[in-house]
Amino acid sequence: MNLLIIGSGGREHALAWAASRSALRPRIYALPGNPGIAELGTLLPGDAADHDLVTAAVAEHAIDLVLVGPEAPLVAGLADHLSERGVRVFGPRRAAAALEGSKVFCKELMQRAGVPTAAFRVAEDSKTALAWAAEMPLPHVVKADGLAGGKGALIVHDRDEARAAVEALMVEERFGAAGRRVVFEEFLDGEEMSVFALVSGEEYALLPASQDYKRAADGDRGLNTGGMGAYAPVVGWTPTLEAQVRRRVIEPTLAALTSAGTPYMGLLYCGLMVQAEKPAVVEFNCRFGDPETQAVVPLLAGDLLEAIWAATDPAGSRGALTGIEPDGRAAVCVVIASQGYPGPVRKGLPIAERAVVSSDEALIFQAGTRREGQRLVTAGGRVLSVVGLGRDLPQARAHAYEAIPKEPFDGASWRHDIAWRGMAALEGASGSSRN
Ligand code: AMP
Ligand code: GLY
């Protein structure tokens, strides 16, 4: 099988790594990929926004399956373009990818389907939005309707912040057209979790739940980032919660999409806020999460690529999405970022070779890296994902931090407390059982 992975991050490296272990023995291509993926396959140059270029690459390399990593190509209709040309692609068509591409679409669909989520209203113009900013109970959340690279949700605590949020999104147009409409949401309290469902229409399989650490600094302080680390499986994931997520979140959402004539096929990322084993949806994404994927994929006992291949089968065989149950271990992913991330960063700094060598205890996935002759150098904000594996969370966490060398590259920075919420919950549980 010839597999083409679209994207260049740690998520795509982790997916390529999983594919490289598949019984389907794929020949792996990535567009544009990164030096980590280059060790597992062939990199193809180009930009996935150019649908004709992707189609030409598919033809030239006789690609059997395209696996799309990031959201932007899906929201722009890459899956439609390829499917219409007879190419098997894992990732939703544009109409279903709108779950991530438009918060308004997503909230309205959840409302229709009765999926638990924060109460909301949509403002179409800044005058209305400013009026609501002055009266909506605090705290609340103001969100750009469209894609904003994970930075379009502003949590506001007072009236000044509320007004500033509307001005940033709708007047200054910080995220361009994405902020032309905004969603006001009630603030949800609870434990945030990410749950991935591998979906084909209304059939799906759940992957182990994870938790993302989005803030730049220890103690969940500092700016929001794409994600500084993650761990899985999440402590606090119970059979009761799982049943709620299946029946109240995933199944009604998939049914609503099918009955709207836009069935879902691909990875459905459910961003949840959980309180007392009850989930509410914060967001849906139309693709694997980054960095959660790096922590989740190594825990799957079965063959992820076989499940993805089955999901894309146009004949759609029932029960095909089985065999990817977790193996019982835990994983902690620590992202090594460039100094200054999520702001502007210096690039081209040499990376120590020992920083990218995987072992049985820790896998290293590459993201913002580049080859410069024989040297590996930094090429972005998030540079490496170090994924510690262990029989339980404390061991996985120890393995992750032990695998990070003293100075992976000049100015390398990472959080020292990834998975702290899980660790605290475990300590709380053992403390109470001792008492
Ligand atoms: P989003 O862009 O919808 O993914 O939101 C980004 C982040 O903002 C989420 O991961 C949450 O941490 C936070 N967030 C978004 N919506 C809410 C909400 N209604 N209540 C509390 N936190 C939220
Ligand atoms: N880690 C959050 C995301 O992938 O959207």
Image: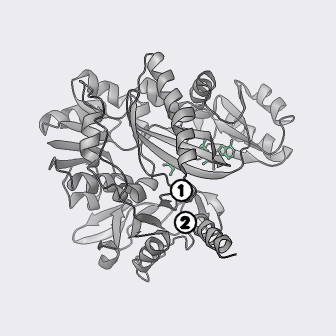
Amino acid type, residue under disc 1 in the picture: Gln
- x 50%, y 60%: residue: 230
Relative to residue 44, is residue 73 depicted above or below? above
**Residue 419 marker:** 2
Residue 337 relative to residue 420: left or right: left
Q: CA distance from mark 1 to mark 2?
A: 8 Å
Q: Decide which of tag 1 and tag 2 comes sooner along the chain.
A: 1
The residue beneath circle 1 is: 211
Disc 1 secondary structure class: strand
Image quadrant containing the N terminus: top left
Q: Is residue 150 visible?
A: no
Number of residues whose C-alpha sits closer than 10 Å to that of mark 2, classed few (under 14), some (14–19) or many (20 or more): many
Label 2 CB less than 8 angstroms from ligand 2: no
Image quadrant containing the C terminus: bottom right
Q: How is the image coloured?
A: one colour
Provide residue 299's location: percent of width, then percent of height. 36, 58
Amino acid type, residue under disc 2 in the picture: Ala
